[in-house]
Image (cartoon, grey):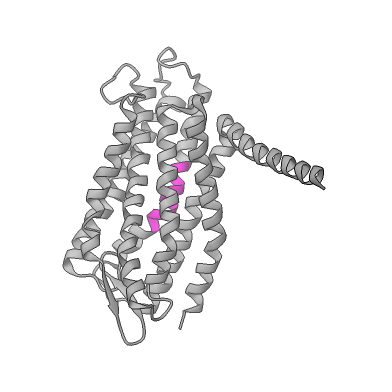
Amino acid sequence: MADLFVLGFALASIPLYIFGLIGNSMVIRIVHKTREMHTTTNYLLANLAVSDAIVILIIPMYFAYSGGFGLLVENVGKLLCKCVVIGDIAMASSASTLSVIAVERYHAILKPFSSNLRLNEQNIKKAIALIWISNTVLGFPGFFLHEWNKEANYSSCHGPWGFKATLESNIYSITYCVLTGYIPVVVFLFCYGSLIKGLYFSNAVCAESTNEDNSEKKKLLITFILATSGFLLGYGPFALFYAITFRKEIEFDFYVRRKAVLLFLLAISLCLNPVLYASRSSNFQEGFKRIFLHRSSQRVEQNATQLASV
């Protein structure tokens, strides 16, 4: 029988899934269809939207296999237990993409004449491919570590992040948290801390280094800091609670309910970026308007055709 607490959070997450999928899909479409948006930064934002959309699709599987819905059909449980690894890969890709954005902005603004680590239209696709390849390698052991388990009163997926983790799973989870959580946080703090210092306090930014004025640079900086904060809002509690409860005995009900709350926070964070871009970027605002106006005009044409045929 389903835990009503878990069921409530699962149902409350459904509107977030829909909104997040639509919003991130629109971000991808705008960058893909708009020639002026074909910049290194926007390609990375589109890649972030792809990662977020994949995680949104996988979150219901996390809810289903966590054990809060009682017994699942064995074959379905085994499938879900393996499929969630795709979400782990996508989440790691989000962390890597945000880290690359932070490093790219750091070099673009503070070290504009250093071309070694600068991204351009020639190497951005290689950088994105490298992000996915490296994180697929990182997530691949999860396919072997996640094991379906059927107890007398519940069914659950054991392995990394699971209720009963083996030594191998714990080692993998620590490695995953370090590479996708703790190291990116250090990168964020260094890059954005240096940018805040250079733009707001020391005035170390060379005005001739880019075509952007300081106000535009500050606006972009705040946008990326907010996007990064949204990611940390969703992923940070997972890493924090895992560190707190590592190797500790916890009740199964507490584990399931805690995971439901964390997944709900993750779903919220995955919806924030499209709203952020629409509120702070004029290019994305125009892109969203074109999509909505195009669909509105299509409906008007369809209605006119139907009336004409009467």
Residue at (45% x, 55% y) in the render: 56
Instruction: Judge left or right: residue 148 versus residue 23.
Output: left
Count of labels in the image: 0
Image quadrant where one finds the N terminus: bottom left
Hey, which residue is sitting farthest left in the picture?
A: 167
Hey, which residue is sitting farthest top in the picture?
A: 208
User: In x, y percent, where is residue 226?
Assistant: 48, 41
* Image vertical order of residue 187 relative to residue 53, above or below: above
* Image vertical order of residue 31 relative to residue 89, above or below: above
Toward the viewer: 49 or 109? 49
Report whether residue 235 is seen.
yes
**Taken as a whole, is the magenta stretch helix, strand or loop?**
helix
User: In x, y percent, where is residue 281?
Assistant: 56, 32
User: In x, y percent, where is residue 82?
Assistant: 30, 64
Residue range (magenta): 227-237
User: In x, y percent, where is residue 93?
Assistant: 33, 46
* Image vertical order of residue 259 relative to residue 56, above or below: below
